[in-house]
Amino acid sequence: MNEINPIELGRQYEFLIQLGGIFHFICGLFHLIFPRMFKWEEHLSGLSKEDLKVIKGNLYTSNICVMLFWFMLAYIPFFFPHEILTTQIGKALLTAIVVIWIIRIFILHPVFSNIKEQLSILRVAFFFIGFLLFFIPWIMCVIL
């Protein structure tokens, strides 16, 4: 019977974590195109100058912060997968990432999206890939 080499298994989980970093980078890039993709300027055009200043400022600021968050969650897993899997703080970060994806998929998306639309279903499938890239190593390295 073949035994599983723990070093090889660890490399496989590190690879998943690095793929997750790339996935998060893609999420950050999507936030770069959100204003155009969702036609923010068109939707905001009917607001008064005062309302436009407040809402536009908050919308763009929040989007930039979320984009930076995704880039941070891309950088750390891509360059430090071993540390994520082997240190207490790394495992805490991995747990936080898994929780973020669970909240995003199972709470935020159903509440704020029409989950019966085809595009919504595709988004959930896309999100689920990101979830699995971190969930599998989390189960093996944090839970077991």
Image (spheres, rainbow, N blue to C red):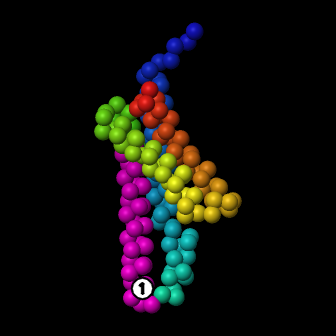
> Farthest residue in the bottom direction?
48
Q: In which quadrant of the rendered view does residue 79 lie?
A: top left
Q: Nearer the viewer, residue 22 or 131?
A: 131
- Residue identified by numbered label 1: 51
Q: Which quadrant does the C terminus fall into?
A: top left
Q: Which quadrant does the N terminus fall into?
A: top right
Residue name at image x 39 percent, y 37 percent = 81
Specify the amino acid type for callout 1. Answer: Asp
- Give x and y (percent) for residue 32: 47, 65
Residue name at image x 38 percent, y 81 percent = 54
- Give x and y (percent) for residue 116: 68, 60
- Give x and y (percent) for residue 143: 43, 30
Residue name at image x 52 percent, y 13 percent = 3
Residue name at image x 38 percent, y 57 percent = 69
Looking at the rendered structure, the number of numbered marks drawn on it comes to 1
In magenta, the rendered stretch is 48-77
Q: Is residue 63 visible?
A: yes
